[in-house]
Structure formats: C-alpha cells, structure tokens
Image (spheres, rainbow, N blue to C red):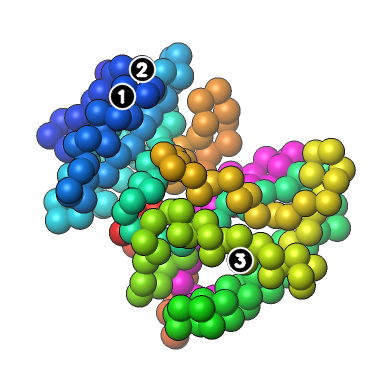
C-alpha cells in the first residue's frame, strides 16, 4: 500500500467506491477532518484517506511526503455541507479555438469576479488572491482556479450557484465563449464540478493512465507586487 510516510495521519479504506466513501464521510461528521482519494498507479483502484482537521493538518508536512511519491493520483473530496473556497474549472479544446486569448480572458474574468463578489457579498477580490493550477495538453487547455478571500462559501453547492451567476454574466458580456468538441458554442467554465461528493485533483497529481500533471501556473500578488504562495492555498477546504 503506498500512502504517506506518517501512517498516523491517514486511515486507508480499501473497499468499493460507495461503501468506501460513505465510511470516510462517517469519520468526518461533526469535525473538520479531510477526505482524499487516490488511484492505485498499478490498477486505478481507489483508496479513500481521512486526514485530521485543521488544528492538526500540516500542509507543509503533507506536501513534503506527497511530493516524494513515485506516482501521484490524488484528489481532494469537496464536502457539500462544509465551507470551501470559491473555485473554477476552465477548459477548452486548443485546435478548435486557435484565436482564443487566455491572458485577455483572465484579465476580463478577474474584473468580472471582482465586480460580482463586491456587489453580491461585499468581498474585495481585485484579481490578487488566487492560485491557478494547470494541466493543459497540446489538445486541451485545462486550469483550476482557487480564489482566496477573507470569506468562504457555505458549501461547494453555494459556490456552484455563484459560478452559474458568473457564467450568465460572461455570456451576457460575450467573454470566455469557445467552441466545444462538437464545434458548438460553449463557455470556458465547466459548471459540472459543484456536485455533492465532488472530488478535484491535487497539485502535482495526474489522472490514472494519463501523464499530464497539475502544476502551479499562477499565484497571488501582495500590495507590493510580490508573489505570495503558501501550500495551504492549494486546498479547496480552508
């Protein structure tokens, strides 16, 4: 069994997916425990892992051991009943959208986020507080954007409601419009990542059977323009 070196940090649950996840979630009722799942690099079978809550969770220690694993297919479970950071999944097919300017999109996207967060929740974003993770290939652009502010959404479902508001605003402004695999009009945002029992891939991990690893592509700036990066920024739950 390959998991992190500190066996006390994780409980490994090798069962079928549903019973495995249910058992893992049962260990998180009424506390701040975290759930991860990993795909075995030999056969893709999932193992669910439970880590202690915020008071005992050490992000730096986690990544110190995690980054030394020979193969990483790790996902963070996003609880549908616990606070989480705002996040977005952005993707489009590169050959079908050769003229799409991703830098221009991000500039407009951050402005729209700043406007909507301020208007709806009185949250200041200003395009500063974020982490961008990239696993693009020559065929497909793929980014995860994790937004950091002084407030959290009540759950990923609530984050999804807001993401749909953002999507409607983007369509209204004709920002982030792309062609999908059927050459139909689509939006760069994937709105299917806000479900109950959602899992999202961790930094430095690839999908089982794939070689594209999720890498750091962008981080926040402080008021002096200095790049800010803390390993806890890489998680969806605070």
Q: Position of residue 169 (x, y in %)?
A: 69, 70
Residues at marks 1 and 2, CA–CA distance in whole angstroms: 6 Å
Disc assigned to residue 20: 1
Q: Is residue 20 left or right of residue 236?
A: left
- Alpha-carbon neighbours of circle 1 within 10 Å: few (<14), some, or many (≥20)? some
State the residue position of label 2. Answer: 16
For the C terminus, the image quarter is: bottom left
For the N terminus, the image quarter is: top left
- Which label sits in the foreground, 2 or 3? 3
Residues at marks 2 and 3, CA–CA distance in whole angstroms: 36 Å
Q: Is residue 134 left or right of residue 18?
A: right
**What span is in magenta?**
125-144
Q: Position of residue 163 (x, y in %)?
A: 57, 61
Residue at 52% in and 31% down: 207
- Alpha-carbon neighbours of circle 3 within 10 Å: few (<14), some, or many (≥20)? few
Quadrant in the picture for residue 88: bottom right
Residues at marks 3 and 1, CA–CA distance in whole angstroms: 34 Å
Q: Is residue 62 left or right of residue 152?
A: left
């Amino acid at each position: 069994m390959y998991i992190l070196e500190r066996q006390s940090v994780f409980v490994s649950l090798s069962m079928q997916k549903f019973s495995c996840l249910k058992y893992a979630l049962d260990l998180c009722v009424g506390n701040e425990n975290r759930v991860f799942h990993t795909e075995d690099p030999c056969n893709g079978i999932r193992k669910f892992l439970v880590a202690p809550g915020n008071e005992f969770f050490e992000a730096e220690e986690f990544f110190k051991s995690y980054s030394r694993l020979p193969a990483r297919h790790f996902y963070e479970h996003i609880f549908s009943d616990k606070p989480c950071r705002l996040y977005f999944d952005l993707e489009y097919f590169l050959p079908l959208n050769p003229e799409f300017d991703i830098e221009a999109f991000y500039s407009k996207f951050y402005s729209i986020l700043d406007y909507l967060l301020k208007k709806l929740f009185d949250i200041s974003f200003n395009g500063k507080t974020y982490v961008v993770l990239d696993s693009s290939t020559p065929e497909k652009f793929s980014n995860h954007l994790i937004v950091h502010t002084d407030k959290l959404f009540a759950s990923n479902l609530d984050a999804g409601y807001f993401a749909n508001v953002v999507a409607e605003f983007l369509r209204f402004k004709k920002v982030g419009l792309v062609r999908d695999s059927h050459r139909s009009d689509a939006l760069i945002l994937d709105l299917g990542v806000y479900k109950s029992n959602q899992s999202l891939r961790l930094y430095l991990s690839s999908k089982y059977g794939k070689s594209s690893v999720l890498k750091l592509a962008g981080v926040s700036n402080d008021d002096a323009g200095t790049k800010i990066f803390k390993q806890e920024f890489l998680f969806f739950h605070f």
